[in-house]
Image (cartoon, helix red, strand yellow):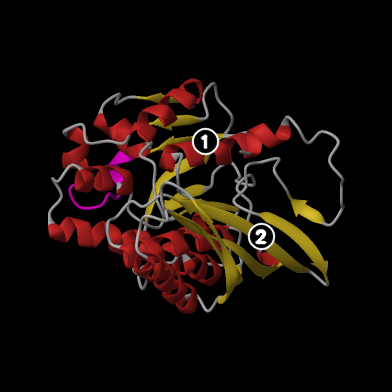
Amino acid sequence: MSQVLRGITKNVISDDKLLVGIETSDDAAVYDLGNDNLLITTLDFFTPIVDDPYTFGLIGAANSLSDVYAMGGYPKMAMNIVCFPNCLSPSILQEILRGGFDKMMEAECLCVGGHTVQDDEPKYGLSVSGFCHRKDLLRNSSANEGDLIIMTKPIGTGVLTTAIKAGFAKQDEIDEVVKSMSTLNAFGLKAIEQGGGATAATDITGFGLAGHLIEMLDGADLSCDLYTDKLVAIKSAHDYAQMGLVPKGTYDNKKYFSNRYESMHNDYIDDLVFDPQTSGGLLITADEKRANKIMQALNDSPYPGAIIGEVTKKREKRLYVK
């Protein structure tokens, strides 16, 4: 959407207090409230990726809240966004909202209402407002040459949800991917804080790990090496990807970013790195000293994370998948 908006907002009203807008495909907008206090605002919603309404609510809320964590802030209040068919029982809607509410309560984020419209397919998410101090603000475009790249959650949610829809996934695999998608990214932000800060961050969602990494590199005008032997994937994601159980979005991502990356694999590994993630983890860049401290902090988190690459000077391509 940011790219479309850029083409129609050339004469947009400007405001010096808008610190982050649509220019760099950041995760949220940021407005200066004064006294170094910043407002972070974002919105996200999507169609069900699991059958259970309550679990869908959990995942939808966690996904929406993630953008605030990715910008270095903590969510404070949120409003529900719901599209719902009139042919389904209101009890299903209640369960979706209950899941979202429980996740907001876990995040210590106020639920302050929302809006519902009739639609042919259910959709759910949140409009979220959060806050951070100016010194804590994280951008997706401020990585430095020599930074190490950290991922906080395993990848493969797109592959696993495809396997679930196809009836291949086992219950333990379903449980693992649901746990990942419904885990708040607060743990990643806390690790950044404990590690002394990061140079840049984003969360991994629809463009996959590789796509969002390319966006970071575009903003910083740098390149990077991504070491696939360091990647961490959800249980059985490699197996299902080798079977061809990958979502259409994977192929869309590879095509969209085709002129900005080079890979030595050109097989299911590329499918995994471009796998669209739902409520994926944070993608973080930091200098070596701070990166190691962040990794130490992640040892006590729901997921230990991994150092998966290094930012380099600008080369012909943005991303080199090794």
Query: Can residue 161 be seen from the camera position used here?
Result: yes
- Residue nearest the observer in this picture, 78 or 173: 78
- Secondary structure under tag 1 reads helix
Q: Is residue 183 left or right of residue 175?
A: right
Q: How many marks?
A: 2
**Which residue lies at the image location 67% right of the left edge and 69% below the top edge?**
132
Query: Can residue 284 be seen from the camera position used here?
Result: no
**Which residue lies at the image location 56% right of the left edge and 38% below the top edge?**
215
- Residue nearest the observer in this picture, 88 or 302: 88
Q: Position of residue 15 (x, y in %)?
A: 87, 51
Q: Position of residue 307 (x, y in %)?
A: 39, 51
Callout 2: 10 Å neighbours few (<14), some, many (20+)? many
Residue holding disc 2: 41
Verify whether residue 235 appears in magenta: yes
**Which residue lies at the image location 40% right of the left edge and 38% below the top edge?**
226
Q: Is residue 207 above or below residue 253?
A: below
- Majority secondary structure of magenta residues: loop
**Which residue lies at the image location 72% right of the left edge and 34% below the top edge?**
6
The C terminus appears in which quarter of the rendering? top left
Circle 1: residue type: Ile
Circle 2: residue type: Thr
- Secondary structure under tag 2 reads strand
Q: Is residue 184 left or right of residue 247?
A: right
Q: Position of residue 314 (x, y in %)?
A: 59, 29
- The magenta segment is 227-237
Q: Nearer the viewer, mark 2 or mark 1?
A: 2
Verify whether residue 313 appears in magenta: no
Q: Are marks 2 and 1 in contact (CB under 8 Å)?
A: no
Residue holding disc 1: 214
Q: Position of residue 227 (x, y in %)?
A: 35, 39
